[in-house]
Amino acid sequence: MRKPLVMGNWKMHGSRASVKQLLGGLVREGGYPSVDVVVCPAFVHIPLAVSLCEGSGLGVGAQDCSHMAAGAYTGEVAAEMLVDSGCRWVILGHSERRQYHGESDDMVAAKVAAALAAGLAPVVCVGETRDEREAGEAQYTVARQLQGALRGQSNTRHLVVAYEPVWAIGTGLTATPQEAQAMHAFIREQLADLKGVDAAATRVLYGGSVKPDNAAELFAETDIDGALVGGASLDAQDFQAIVAAARG
Ligand code: 13P
């Protein structure tokens, strides 16, 4: 049985004040017992988030990390630094990084290796563009991204995969639960073919315009183990409603 996981990707939003306010609305007595809940603020807000989440059961993750362990890499943040700052998770290969920073499958693979070596749980994002879907290439793209990111990894115990169709991110368009389930099942099949991956134990999250009113029907699907939430994670009430839907 896979424990549901709901992650908030705050992207490049927030201030110290808004982080305090948002986490003030999320940290609650008793925590979130039957679901893993993780927030991913911008790097500079990680220490504040970690201190505010302490003892709450809420986890903190980052939105990226360097592919290198240490050295002369101006502007980069190493996976080890994230662990040292209290992070346990890191989002890798998000479509916005692939699009705006030219991240290739090879770069994502190097980042996954760095994250796993440091003991972080990598949340590997995959997903097709609208053109790729319309051309019937959605599965091909997702399989290529998965194989590219996970090739040669021998210990993927903490691996999480997030299926985020690019056309559904920030657009208000969501894959239907059936479309999402079909791709999640395909992802699990692909994972089963990869050496060193326990496909049945790996959580596969859905991302792309997840909101309180569509979360429950997505989570009802067999292979959807939670969500990677963008916009709605910036509102404590909406995010909590999505977490509640994951709890069933
Ligand atoms: P939205 O929920 O805003 O569509 O963003 C999804 C996403 O990119 C999460 O990583």
Image: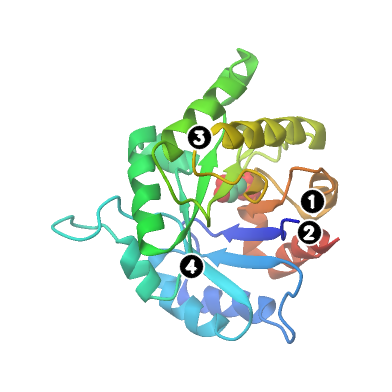
Q: Point out the tag, 1 or 3, that comes first from the N-terminus.
A: 3
Q: Residue at x 56, y 81 (%)?
A: 53
The residue at which mark 3 appears reads as 146
Q: Which mark is residue 215?
A: 1
Q: Check the image and name the residue furthest to the left.
A: 72
Please tell me whether residue 132 is drawn above or below residue 97 in the rendered image: above
Label 4 is placed on what type of residue? Arg
Instruction: Indicate the amino acid at tag 1.
Output: Ala
Name the foreground residue: 96 vs 68.
68
Residue 146: tell me if it is visible: yes
Q: Nearer the viewer, mark 1 or mark 2?
A: 2
Residue occupying image coordinates x 57% and y 33%: 127
Q: CA distance from mark 3 to mark 2?
A: 25 Å
The span from disc 2 to disc 4 (Cα, nearest Å) is 21 Å
* Residues under numbered marks 4 and 1 in contact, where contact means CB atoms less than 8 Å apart: no
- Badge 4 residue CB within 8 Å of ligand 1: no
Q: What residue did someone put label 2 on?
A: 246
Foreground mark, 1 or 3, reads 3
Image location of residue 236, percent across then percent down: 69, 69
Disc nearer the start of the sequence (3/2)? 3
The image quarter in which residue 118 lies: bottom left
Residue 159 in the image: x percent, y percent? Answer: 53, 52
Residue 226 horizontal side relative to residue 39, left or right: right
Please name which of the two marks, 2 or 4, marks the residue nearer to the observer.
Answer: 4
Residue 18, image quadrant: bottom right
Q: Are marks 1 and 2 in contact (CB under 8 Å)?
A: yes
Q: Which residue in the structure is indicated by mark 4?
A: 88
How far apart, in angstroms, are the residues tagged by discs 4 and 1? Answer: 24 Å
At horizontal 34% and vertical 54% (from top left) the residue drawn is 114
Q: Is mark 2 within 8 Å of ligand 1?
A: no
Give the alpha-carbon distance from disc 1 to disc 3, as whole Å: 24 Å
> Reading the chain from its start, which is encountered first: label 3 or label 4?
4
